Image (cartoon, rainbow, N blue to C red):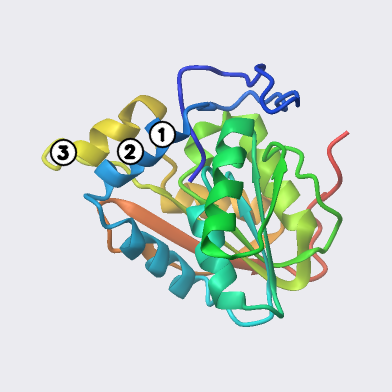
Amino acid sequence: MQATSRQQTSTEPALGSQAPTTSGIVLHSPILYDLTVWLAFFGKEHRFRNNVLELAHVASGESVLDVGCGTGTLAIAAKRRVGTGGSVSGVDASPEMLARAEKKAKASGMEVLFKAGVAEKLPFSDASFDLVLCTVMLHHLPAKPRQRCAMEIRRVLKPEGRVLAVDFEGFSDQKRSFLSHFHRPHGHVGVRDIERLLGEAGLRSVESGPLGIRDLQFVLARPIMNSSAHVERNS
């Protein structure tokens, strides 16, 4: 789940480093982020994490990337599943989020690599991961960066890899809650939009539907072999 706020670019240095710049929305308060997530899921964030990891079919020994990792909770949970033979990396545009994520990982005894970076230009080599997680962050990106994010996910995936994308479908007027107010200012990306976005990047949807929590929807996709999609590194 990528951090959010009114700021459109990340410009403040933290821990002696300059934050990467993104046209997406970035939050710099780990405490506010964790509190908002806790409230959004009524203290049952573990259910959200478990659903995501089950739908992603996370297996022992795999390499996993969490795009927009926030304070690292999902990445740490994924590391428990892949075990010592696997690896998990997390990337986020906020140094403050990453600092909190590293503290969480250390406290849990889990070894997770956290990197500063943006979804539009992932700081990883081609074909590096068996699985990419992209949870509740696509709606934070404008259209063009969102497209670049999808292309970058395709680039870092192994040929037989997969991506699980999760985002808000959008509530009807008759179905409002705290969570709807939480994401209403930032919009939503429905399941059909996600499938189209990933398809244009050379990723084929193999499973999709409701996550089982509020209006969250998921799409599980795999690379299209011999795809004509133009996949390249951001310049």
Q: Earlier in the sequence, mark 3 or mark 1?
A: 1
Q: Is residue 45 above or below residue 185?
A: below
Residue type at mark 1?
Ile
Q: Can you tell which mark lies on residue 35?
A: 2
Q: Which residue is mark 3?
A: 176
Judged from the image, the secondary structure of the residue bearing numbered disc 3 is loop
Residue type at mark 3?
Arg
Q: Which corner quadrant of the image does residue 44 belong to?
A: bottom left
Give the Cα separation between the discs numbered 3 and 1: 25 Å
Q: Quadrant of the C terminus?
A: top right
Q: Can you tell which mark lies on residue 31?
A: 1
Judged from the image, the secondary structure of the residue bearing numbered disc 1 is helix
Residue at position x 59%, y 81% from top?
Answer: 59
Residue type at mark 2?
Leu
Q: Position of residue 214 (x, y in %)?
A: 25, 52
Residue at position x 14%, y 43% from top?
Answer: 175
